[in-house]
Amino acid sequence: MNDLATIIRQAVFFFIPFLISLSIHEAGHAYIANKLGDPTAKILGRISLNPFRHADFFGTFLFPLISIIIPGGGALFGWAKPVPINGRNLKNPKLHRRFL
């Protein structure tokens, strides 16, 4: 069974990089959508590296932390809230939809 020190060490080495990568990924979606003509995500403050702007309670915190705590839990897996996109605002919707 994992002791508390091991769990804390795993949380530091796995969960914090997970939060950073999730934030970069979602902020990238928001940034590209804005560059392609849809300011929806920018208006909602989603072009941000702040993980709390993108956080989904179950997918960003609960599910990944449980997978760290459970011995042999497997790969760290999680998700964030999807970036809101209004396809009607895109400069060339047919072409740009494939980039989002």
Image: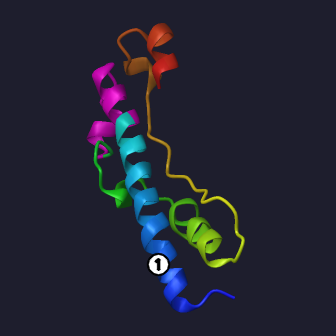
Q: Position of residue 35 (x, y in %)?
A: 28, 23
Q: Measuring from the top left, give residue 62's x and y in whole percent.
A: 57, 70
Q: Dot 1 corresponds to which residue?
A: 9
Report the magenta residues as a range: 29-45
Instruction: From the viewer's side, name the closer residue of 20 and 7.
Output: 7
Task: Give the image location of residue 29, x and y in percent.
Answer: 40, 34
Residue drawn at x 61%, y 66% is 63
Q: Name the residue rendered at 47%, 9% in the picture.
A: 95
Seen in the picture, residue 72 relative to 36 is either above or below; the reply is below
Whether residue 72 is situated above or below residue 7 in the rendered picture:
above
Q: Is residue 73 left or right of residue 48?
A: right
Which residue is at 36% across, 27% downward?
A: 33
Mark 1: which secondary structure?
helix
Residue 98 position within the rendered picture, expressed as x and y whole percent measured from the top left: 52, 17
Residue 91 lies in the magenta stretch: no
Residue at the (40%, 8%) spot, across then down? 92
